[in-house]
């Protein structure tokens, strides 16, 4: 069914020169709560809702589509970053995680980011570049810790939000659909290749008790794609091989590529969703709530996100707050749909899967296995 969507505000280009530049503002748990009442959090909630609704009933295109000029430019940018991996091969190293070549790749990104963003954006967007540069640079992992996680994925989503607030990307269904089904899969494939070639460590992993070591938004959007159909049950994810036309399926196949062993052991939460949640609508709404709690509500994740400027740190005005019923949920759910998932059921058989990057050959993946003596995260 069609849902009423809030409109995403527009920030005029002429106003940006007077904005403060984004800085790290979240240092305490109280700061997290301040952010959850801010205009930037409200903008992000509206943005994700709109992206999610734009792909209901839609598949990832399997043939070449004709995206807008803005989407085409972003795709070209991601393709250029992917080509750098061939130019900066991994060093010979005995370390299990963290190849030093990733720091070389990251240094090049930091040095060339202004030029890359200037090529991406029209000339009249020059004032936007210093505001979006921090989110762009941190979208691909930490070059110091040599890891990647849901906070970096969130940085990329905030980068896209800023481009939409300034109307480089248009908050219209077709463009929003292209963001999810064209840009986001390309971003994921780039990040997967970075993780595999440079052996990036999962950032802040909860092991088998987390949803995924490095991604979250793809599960939200993928469950949104399937939300209003009944032919494909939630339990279908336990029976690979899954088609790469759905983001949820892509991420499940990625897990089966990099982790060995019974699925219910190394991905118990995803297995519990597959066996205990009755339909994709409840999966979709539950994942939105979980994302708010486990990613946006965790200081250790959001403390690395700079705020201010385009992503306003100020609290929402009382008038705006009343009009939008603060605090805004990431998704509107009738009734009391709760996010906890059912307990794990018997194991499913794991099988070999193909790589979901591109058709070109890539380095072999080193499987990750959770130690058998791991306990639940503190």
Image: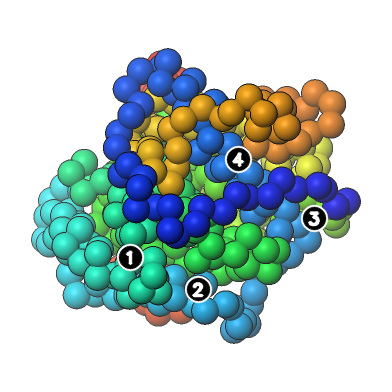
**Callout in the foreground (2, 1):** 1
Tag shown at residue 29: none
Label 2 or label 3, whichever comes before in sequence order: 2
Label 2 or label 1, whichever comes before in sequence order: 2
Residue 102 appears in the picture as rendered: yes
Q: Give the side of residue 32 with respect to residue 305, left or right.
A: right
Give the CA separation, mark 4 to mark 2: 22 Å
Which secondary structure lies at badge 1? helix
* Quarter the C terminus occupies: top left
Residue 96 pos. (x, y %):
21, 46
Tag shown at residue 70: 2
Residue wearing tag 1: 126
| Other-residue count near label 2 (Cα within 10 Å), few / some / many at <14 / 14–19 / ≥20 | some
Residue at x 38%, y 38% (from the top left corner): 308
Residue at x 45%, y 38% (from the top left corner): 312
Residue 244 appears in the picture as rendered: no
Residue at x 30%, y 44% (from the top left corner): 21
Give the CA separation, mark 1 to mark 3: 46 Å
| Other-residue count near label 4 (Cα within 10 Å), few / some / many at <14 / 14–19 / ≥20 | many
Residue wearing tag 3: 232
Which secondary structure lies at badge 2? helix
Residue at x 16%, y 47% (from the top left corner): 95
């Amino acid at each position: 069914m069609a849902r009423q969507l809030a409109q995403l505000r527009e920030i005029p280009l002429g106003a940006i020169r007077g904005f403060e530049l984004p800085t790290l503002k979240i240092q305490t748990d109280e700061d997290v709560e301040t952010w959850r009442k801010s205009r930037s959090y409200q903008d992000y909630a509206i943005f994700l809702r709109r992206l999610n609704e734009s792909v209901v009933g839609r598949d990832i295109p399997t043939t070449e589509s004709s995206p807008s000029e803005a989407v085409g430019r972003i795709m070209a940018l991601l393709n250029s970053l992917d080509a750098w991996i061939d130019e900066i091969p991994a060093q010979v190293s005995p370390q299990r995680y963290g190849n030093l070549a990733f720091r070389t790749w990251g240094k090049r990104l930091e040095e060339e980011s202004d030029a890359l963003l200037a090529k991406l954006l029209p000339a009249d967007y020059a004032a936007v570049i210093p505001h979006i540069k921090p989110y762009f640079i941190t979208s691909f992992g930490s070059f110091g810790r040599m890891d990647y996680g849901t906070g970096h994925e969130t940085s990329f989503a905030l980068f896209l939000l800023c481009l939409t607030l300034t109307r480089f990307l248009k908050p219209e269904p077709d463009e929003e659909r292209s963001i999810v089904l064209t840009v986001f899969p390309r971003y994921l494939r780039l990040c997967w290749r970075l993780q595999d070639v440079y052996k990036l460590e999962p950032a802040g992993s909860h092991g088998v008790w987390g949803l995924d070591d490095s991604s979250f938004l793809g599960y939200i959007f993928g469950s949104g794609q399937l939300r209003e159909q009944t032919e494909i049950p939630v339990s279908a994810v336990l029976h690979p091989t899954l088609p790469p036309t759905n983001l949820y399926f892509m991420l499940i196949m990625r897990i089966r590529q990099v982790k060995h062993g019974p699925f219910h052991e190394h991905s118990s939460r995803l297995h519990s969703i597959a066996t205990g949640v009755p339909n994709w609508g409840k999966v979709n709404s539950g994942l939105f709530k979980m994302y708010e709690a486990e990613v946006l509500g965790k200081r250790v994740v959001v403390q690395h996100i700079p705020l201010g400027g385009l992503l306003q740190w100020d609290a929402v005005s009382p008038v705006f707050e009343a009009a939008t019923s603060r605090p805004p949920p990431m998704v509107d759910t009738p009734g009391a749909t709760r996010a906890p998932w059912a307990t794990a059921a018997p194991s499913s058989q794991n099988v070999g899967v193909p790589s979901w990057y591109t058709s070109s050959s890539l380095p072999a993946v080193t499987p990750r296995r959770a130690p058998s003596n791991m306990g639940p995260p503190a």
